[in-house]
Structure formats: C-alpha cells, structure tokens
Image (cartoon, grey):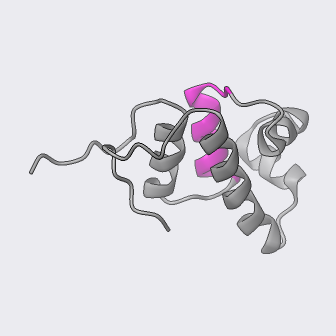
Amino acid sequence: MRTLDPRSSRHTAGESLSALLREYADRVLRNGKTQAQVARDAWLDESYVSRLLSGERDNPSRDALLLLASWGLGLAVEETDELLVAADYKPLILPSSR
C-alpha cells in the first residue's frame, strides 16, 4: 500500500487513475473475484466497470469511484483516498496539519 501525500505531484487525473484502478483490480482479480462480481458488488454496470478498468473511460464520478473502490474492490480507506486524489477529488480523510 502506498502512503497518501496530498502534496505529492505524482497524482495526475486520468493516467494515474487508470493505472491505480488497474493495479488494485488486478490484485482483486488474482484472488479469484471476477470483473462481473466486482461490478455487481459495486452496484455498477459491468460494461462501465470494464471501460474504467481498461482505461477506455477515465472520468468516473466521485460516487462511482467510491462504490467501485469500497464495495467492488474492497479497498482500504487509504487506497480509496489515493484513487480519489488521482481523479482530482478530495480524499475521505483530510491530512492532519503539522
């Protein structure tokens, strides 16, 4: 798992989001869950999830991304936040001030 640093410039919308989604989906799929199950668990259309995971579609709504990350892929909050930041959305957990 990566550490989320909101000051990091490595997060860019689109390319980074697609790569992160694919990385997390590959991990889940290797553990025996199918893409159809991921979509069903996230309450999203299977073709929509397929396009997101293939990089064909790179602009999911925040709600769709939350459903996919939390329910479909079963990601931890920190990993979900990383996807949100990569998609230019605010994370669920705001960083504490130092």
Residue at 77% over, 63% down:
26
Residue numbers of the magenta segment: 59-72
Question: Looking at the image, which is closer to me, 55 or 75?
Answer: 55
Q: Quadrant of residue 68?
A: top right
The image position of residue 95, as x and y in percent, is 24, 47
Q: Is residue 7 magenta?
A: no
Q: Is residue 19 above or below residue 84?
A: below
Q: Is residue 83 above or below residue 4?
A: above
- For this view, does 98 lie left or right of residue 81? left
- Main SS of the magenta segment? helix
Q: Quadrant of residue 7?
A: top left
- For this view, does 97 lie left or right of residue 83? left
Residue at 86% over, 53% down:
35
What is the residue that sits farthest to the front in this orientation?
Answer: 9
The image position of residue 14, as x and y in percent, is 64, 33
Q: Is residue 41 above or below residue 61?
A: below
Residue at 71% over, 31% down:
58
Residue at 57% over, 32% down:
13
The image position of residue 46, as x and y in percent, is 88, 39
